[in-house]
Image: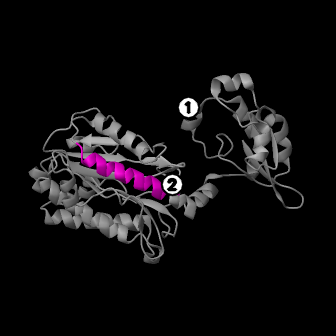
Amino acid sequence: MGVGSTDTDQEHVFHLFVRPKDAKAEQWEGARSGIQAAQDVFNADEAGNVNDLEKVLPSIISKASEVYTDIPGTTKSRTTFSKLFSGPSTKLEGFAKMLDSAKVKPLRPIINGLRVVKSDAEVDNMRFAGRASGRAFTLAMRQKFTREKDLAAFLDYQFKVYGCDTNAYVPVVAGGNKALCIHYVRNNDVLRDEQLVLVDAGGEYGGYITDITRTWPINGKFSEPQKDLYDAILTVQRECIALCRENANITLDKLHSLAEDGLKEQLKQLGFDVSGNAMETLFPHHVGHYIGLDVHDAPGYPRTGNLKVGQCITIEPGLYIPNDERWPQHFRGIGIRIEDSVCVQTEGPLVLTTEAVKEVVDIEALTDR
């Protein structure tokens, strides 16, 4: 547990409480850094045994004018529901009693503000993850798969072959109408010719993730309805990515509105009736979210502020056509999403996942079997 405090000279003091070295425990659980490493490696000003925290922490807290924490039970924001299912915790209750609730403030908004703008080093990690994952996607498109789980396993392996540490998240590998489920993660069905497969996956490198979705024909060739719908989405995605620059003075929410309007116009040209709640059904998710240390980075950070240099987001328009008489018959059961990870720059976007091909002609050339 890390604790920051300010001494009488207004200097910040970094306290770090860790598990002590223990040869017997480490034989079973793996190496521990230990108390000395807390100072030597992690640059703590003061270090101690985490088991002594209850004795030491009250003194530190008593000197603080404000305490920033998101530990459950220390703020008034907990709901009755969360209290009911979180259960009692003597340690948490003890920590809460140490605090004067008047000086407790939420930590998450501060952390979000730090996380949402990436340094050059962070962007480098995300570009590495995007490059490696994109190459794995392109290689997967060259192969012939008959089962979702085989495709999922192939990508998992190739992410690591290309240098990623692990998967960024549980992938979606959805053949045919399984793609109508946004977060389909069973990945246990067969892949059938004449259908598309939607794959939402990515690797992680150095703690930073990438987020990619591609949709391609299992037999290597798009049918005319599949191609028409795919091109409609790709057109809108290109337009949105082009606006991922600071001088566009645009928010993620505004990008979503533009994406929805663009998809609506494309659908009209394809013969869809887009009146009423049509777009809520056909495009039910937001066009993008922040990414970084997590796939939905900086949870709770608003999408209402103008995009700034160094912010990394996804751009992921999609269309999901239910098997319903309301929609043109030849499009029913098709689900398509195209997603890239993008870093906002001053005058133009930096696409972090450009190695994953997405043009129809390129996909069909890759899958020309």
Residue at 68%, 48% in the rendered image: 69
The magenta span reads 125-143
Residue 230 has which mark?
none
Residue 292 has which mark?
2
Give percent across and percent down for residue 185: 34, 38
Give percent across and percent down for residue 369: 15, 47
Give percent across and percent down for residue 46: 83, 46
Contact between marks 2 and 1 (CB within 8 A): the answer is no
Q: Is residue 107 left or right of residue 100?
A: left
Which residue type does callout 2 highlight? Gly
Q: For the residue labelled by badge 2, is the local secondary structure a helix, a strand or a loop?
A: loop
Q: Is residue 125 left or right of residue 330?
A: right
> Is residue 136 within the magenta segment?
yes
Q: In the rendered image, which quarter contains the N terminus? A: top right
Residue at 42%, 73% in the rendered image: 348
| Front in this rendered view, residue 227 or 277 | 227
In front: label 2 or label 1: 2
Residue 85 has which mark?
1
Asked whether the viewer can see residue 190, the reply is yes
- In which quarter of the view is residue 226 placed? bottom left
| Front in this rendered view, residue 129 or 269 | 129
Q: Residues within 10 Å of mark 1 (few under 14, many from 20)?
A: few
Q: For the residue labelled by badge 1, is the local secondary structure a helix, a strand or a loop?
A: helix
Q: Residues within 10 Å of mark 2 (few under 14, many from 20)?
A: many
